[in-house]
Image (cartoon, coloured by chain):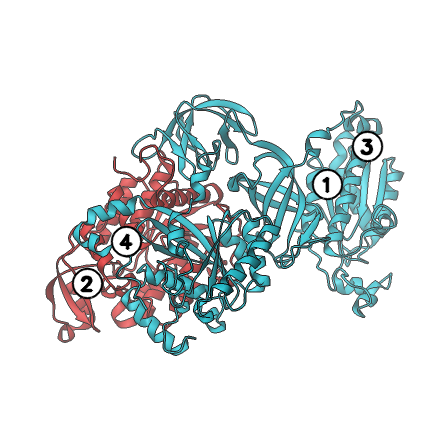
Chain colours: A cyan, B red
């Protein structure tokens, strides 16, 4: 099996190691690193290929080999021969299923390079894992079974690799031994793939006929394919240009991760250089503030550096006392990145719970975390056919394009120019799960062109004329809990006290402003967003606004709270148990929901997330509507009393 | 200076420079986002690299977290000596934790088999993290060590009861690490995930990092048990446990260790490699993998490390 080894110069290291270990270490020290992914369908022989690379580069030791031989006989799929796939398939669950279920990282080295391979699954439901593995890769090996040709999954993997910005694509036509090393088969596949690659914008790729199982064209030219004159897989991997080298030629950018302040005399800015290079004396600009300064020192343990380049973690000190904190970007002063708060981006959804347009998520980009909302997707891409489809949301493993807005302007670069300043993740604020990955295309001009119109009569003036402080009394609770009833009494009482009020009722708003919305989670989020915006305008006008909406999700109630000045949002939880609300069933809706005639009904087949710390909680089992209204008015008047 | 980062002006980085930068970046992210980080320190060569990287990441500040040694009382004496010296030199607080229950019951590797690791290390670690309220613990695990490690994230989440769920791991993209967690949850963070054993040795060599002398060959008192070679680091204690009449034959041999743990569980190899470069040379020419000297992976069969990790072992 290893007949390629003894004469292969790539692995002729033993002699050097034995003769001159210092010389060997010197060679090893100067190796570069290439990260790549392998993608293929379930039976394309991915794990076998990786096992082969490990085996050929002597990353397998005798004891592992002995275990491998024993395992191969016990559970292997290659008869009495070594099943290299067993080396790679790690987790117990997947060994039984015979598939790789997650991203696994493998390591091997040759004379010239160290390699990190992300082994990414070919299984349908795991697009998420492939995107994850591809995000740090310089190169993708797309495996094709020579007997099967270009499959749907080949197209999907190529599309994803291209989307994530991988410039180097290798088309490895595997299992050539099973088609008798037939050139016509190889040429046919390459022709098919070329057509496809061109159609999705892949500028170029390198194709090679291989056998991971037999070792053909893996480390050297195979005698079985005399018609093939290109490089072996390993030769190509050893010589292809890595992205870090390309990044080092671009303008300087570094996101500040941590401000290093051991004492009053030292203030350093630590970060990983995303692109370009830096030297002491270089003029820099801090974003988003735009302040400029010059680099004084590049500080490391041991000695200061004369220069640092993309990919290095450094600590910079500046000549001036400029304001700069975690999340800011230090950039070349003469070509800084843009700053914006609205973007178009490709989004890959990675969570079981679908995307909710309008819901605030955490967005982590570079070293900063901001709040972002995603609009309804412009389209979703069918990753098998590359068709653009209309979509209201994105669910697990879906890829689409949508606009995103953030709660503050932030420095960024288009993903195509800079992965570190253009790639982001979205994090659910409640579960803390990483729900999506995104790639910024460009900022929306809108953000620049729509200015806030200053008006002369301020919200303070509006409120002063009415002699009151604006408030938003946000009633939340199950359907039939008594929200509308109590809210109505509260408004009457406030009106009688001479307050200027307005009641926004859930059912009424759905007859007009929100009549285009249904009751899916996504529509519920949009419903609340609109009501929140309307209520905010009304508080700007100086009104005391009362809203009565189920508003089942904490995230959206929190979003409305954030829209208003501190203290103006008063959350009123009308706390009626599901059993009690269902027993009352004033509108007969629970009965309908129970019988299945009504879908997505809160409490039945759609969740209600109770407020954790409402300003007011009304337990309707302990007081009637009149008493509840009195209590709310009293609480609210009490809060306002200073200016009454 | 022959250091990894202080290389002359250049246009591309070596693999060690990229690995070093990645590890430093990870450490800084944790310090920026976690409330109470700690570095697990086992005094082995990987721990030595981790400590060195921490010094580099935060220089001129000392690393802004303590070191935690989850002790079993069965480590080699040389390890205890280096531990105290290295912590002091780094200007870091050293916390040593020994599971009081294991201590009380006299749990030891001779009489209690797998229970020894479970009580002292797995349980001890959980107890220590809970006691001090650490929400992020740096560990020196590498993906090349073992198959289940190869799939673990760099930021690896643990439930409030310290369990790892391999099927519910957060996707990790680019250099973006999601460090958000609910109260009670914690994360284990592995900055040298992408290093191989050779990278570790090479880095120790280039950066001139001090490691426990047991990694280098010297004449040492040894005995054979179940076909493996061990060092009798504490003869008195050995005799107390196994009994005078069951004492194995002690012979002086020139040995060294590939990994260091509890001395009765760590197999020695016969070797003449007495310097760092000789050790690297021998390692490169050798044909057995690193963990073979460690008994721990083997109990419990095929998926033992995965099982241990789910239970909370590092």
Asked if labels 3 and 2 touch by Cβ distance under 8 angstroms, the answer is no
Report the Cα–Cα distance between label 3 and label 1. 15 Å
- For residue A396, say whether it is visible: yes
Task: Kindly identify which chain the residue marked by label 2 belongs to.
Answer: B
Tag 1 and tag 4 share a subunit: no
Residue for badge 3: A541
Pinpoint residue B55: horizontal percent, then vertical percent.
33, 40
- Label 4 packing within 10 angstroms: few (<14), some (14-19), many (20+): many
Report the Cα–Cα distance between label 1 and label 2. 70 Å
Q: Secondary structure at mark 4?
A: loop
Badge nearest the viewer, 3 or 4: 4
Q: Nearer the viewer, residue A314 or A570?
A: A314
> Within the image, what quadrant is residue A2 found in?
bottom left
Residue for badge 4: B44
Q: Report the disc number at residue B269.
A: 2
Q: Secondary structure at mark 3?
A: loop
Q: In what quadrant of the picture does the N terminus of chain A appear?
A: bottom left
Asked if labels 4 and 1 touch by Cβ distance under 8 angstroms, the answer is no
Task: Decide: is A413 above or below B215.
Answer: above
Task: Kindly identify which chain the residue marked by label 3 belongs to.
Answer: A
> Within the image, what quadrant is residue A48 found in?
bottom left
- Label 1 packing within 10 angstroms: few (<14), some (14-19), many (20+): many
Asked if labels 4 and 3 touch by Cβ distance under 8 angstroms, the answer is no
């Amino acid at each position: 099996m290893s007949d390629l080894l003894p004469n292969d110069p790539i692995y002729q290291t033993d002699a050097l190691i034995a003769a001159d270990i210092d010389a060997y270490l010197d060679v090893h020290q100067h190796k570069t690193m290439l990260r790549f992914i392998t993608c293929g369908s379930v039976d394309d022989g991915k794990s076998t290929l990786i096992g082969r690379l490990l085996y050929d580069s002597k990353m397998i030791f005798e004891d592992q080999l002995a275990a491998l031989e024993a395992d191969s006989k016990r559970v292997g799929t290659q008869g009495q021969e070594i099943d290299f796939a067993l080396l790679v398939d790690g987790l117990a669950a997947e060994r039984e299923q015979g598939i790789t279920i997650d991203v696994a990282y493998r390591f091997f080295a040759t004379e010239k390079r160290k390699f990190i391979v992300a082994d990414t699954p070919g299984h349908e439901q795991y697009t998420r894992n492939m995107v994850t593995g591809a995000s740090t890769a310089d190169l993708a090996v797309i495996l094709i079974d020579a007997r099967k040709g270009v499959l749907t999954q080949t197209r999907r993997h190529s599309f994803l690799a291209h989307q994530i910005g991988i410039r180097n694509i290798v088309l490895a036509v595997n299992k050539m031994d099973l088609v008798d090393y037939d050139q016509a088969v190889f040429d046919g596949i390459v022709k098919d793939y070329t057509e496809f690659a061109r159609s999705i914008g892949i500028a170029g790729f390198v194709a090679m006929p291989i056998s991971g199982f037999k070792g053909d064209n893996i480390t050297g030219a195979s005698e079985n394919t005399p018609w093939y004159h290109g490089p072996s897989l390993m030769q190509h991997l050893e010589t292809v240009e890595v992205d870090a080298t390309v990044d080092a030629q671009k303008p300087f950018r570094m996101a500040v991760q941590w401000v290093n302040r051991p004492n009053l005399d030292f203030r350093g800015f630590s970060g990983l250089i995303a692109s370009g290079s830096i030297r002491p004396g270089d003029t820099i600009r801090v974003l988003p503030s735009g302040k400029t300064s010059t680099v004084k020192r590049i500080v490391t343990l041991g000695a200061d550096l004369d220069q640092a380049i993309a990919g290095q973690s450094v600590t910079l000190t500046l000549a001036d006392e400029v304001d700069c904190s975690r999340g800011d970007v230090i950039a070349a002063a003469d070509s800084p990145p843009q700053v914006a708060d609205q973007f178009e981006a490709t989004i890959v959804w990675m969570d079981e719970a679908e995307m909710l347009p309008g819901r605030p998520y955490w967005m982590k980009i570079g070293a900063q975390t901001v709040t972002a909302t995603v609009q309804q997707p412009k389209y979703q891409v069918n990753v098998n056919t590359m068709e653009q489809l209309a979509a209201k949301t994105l669910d697990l493993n879906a890829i689409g394009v949508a606009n995103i807005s953030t709660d503050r302007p932030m420095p960024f670069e288009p993903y195509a120019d800079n992965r570190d300043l253009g790639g982001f993740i979205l994090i659910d604020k409640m579960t803390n799960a990483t729900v999506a990955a995104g790639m910024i295309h460009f900022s929306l001009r809108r953000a620049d062109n729509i200015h806030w119109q200053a008006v002369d009569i301020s919200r303070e003036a509006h409120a002063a004329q009415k002699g009151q402080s604006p408030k938003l009394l946000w009633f939340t609770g199950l359907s039939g809990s008594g929200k509308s009833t109590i809210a109505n009494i509260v408004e009457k009482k406030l009106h009688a006290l001479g307050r200027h009020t307005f009641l926004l009722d859930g059912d009424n708003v759905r007859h007009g402003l929100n009549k285009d919305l249904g009751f899916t989670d996504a529509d519920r989020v949009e419903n609340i967003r609109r009501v929140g915006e309307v209520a905010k305008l009304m508080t700007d006008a100086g009104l005391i606004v009362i809203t009565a909406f189920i508003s089942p999700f904490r995230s959206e109630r929190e979003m409305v709270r954030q829209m208003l000045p501190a203290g103006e949002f008063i959350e009123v939880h009308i706390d009626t148990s599901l059993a009690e609300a269902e027993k009352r069933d004033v509108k007969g809706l629970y009965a309908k929901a129970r019988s299945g005639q009504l879908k997505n009904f809160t409490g039945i087949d759609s969740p209600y997330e109770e407020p954790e710390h409402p300003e007011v909680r009304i337990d309707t089992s302990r007081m009637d509507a009149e008493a509840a209204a009195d209590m709310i008015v009293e609480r609210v008047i009490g809060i306002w009393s200073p200016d009454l | 200076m022959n250091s990894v980062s202080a290389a002359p002006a250049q246009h591309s980085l070596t693999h060690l420079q990229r690995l070093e930068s990645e590890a430093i970046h990870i450490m800084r992210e944790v310090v920026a986002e976690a409330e109470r980080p700690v570095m697990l320190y086992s005094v082995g060569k990987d721990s030595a690299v981790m400590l060195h990287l921490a010094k580099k990441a935060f220089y001129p500040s000392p690393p802004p977290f303590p070191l935690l040694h989850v002790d079993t009382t069965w480590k080699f004496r040389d390890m205890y000596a280096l531990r105290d010296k290295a912590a002091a030199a780094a200007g870091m607080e050293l916390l040593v934790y020994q599971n009081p229950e294991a201590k009380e019951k006299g749990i030891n590797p001779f009489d209690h088999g797998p229970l020894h690791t479970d009580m002292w290390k797995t349980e001890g670690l959980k107890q220590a993290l809970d006691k001090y309220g650490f929400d992020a613990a740096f560990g020196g695990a590498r993906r090349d060590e073992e198959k289940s490690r190869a799939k673990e994230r760099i930021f690896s989440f643990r439930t409030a009861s310290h369990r790892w769920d391999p099927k519910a791991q957060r996707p990790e993209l680019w250099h973006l690490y999601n460090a958000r967690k609910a109260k009670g949850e914690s994360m284990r963070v592995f900055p040298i995930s992408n290093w191989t054993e050779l990278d570790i040795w090479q880095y120790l060599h280039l950066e001139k990092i001090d490691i426990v002398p047991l990694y280098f060959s010297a004449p040492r008192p040894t005995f054979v048990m179940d076909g493996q070679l061990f060092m009798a680091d504490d003869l008195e204690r050995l005799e107390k446990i196994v009994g005078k009449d069951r004492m194995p034959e002690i012979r002086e041999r020139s040995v060294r260790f590939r990994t260091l743990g509890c001395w009765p569980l760590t197999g020695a190899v016969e070797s003449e490699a007495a310097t760092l470069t000789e050790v690297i040379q021998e390692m490169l020419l050798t044909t057995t993998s690193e963990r073979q000297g460690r008994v721990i992976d083997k109990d419990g069969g095929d998926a033992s490390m995965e099982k241990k990790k789910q239970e909370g072992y590092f």
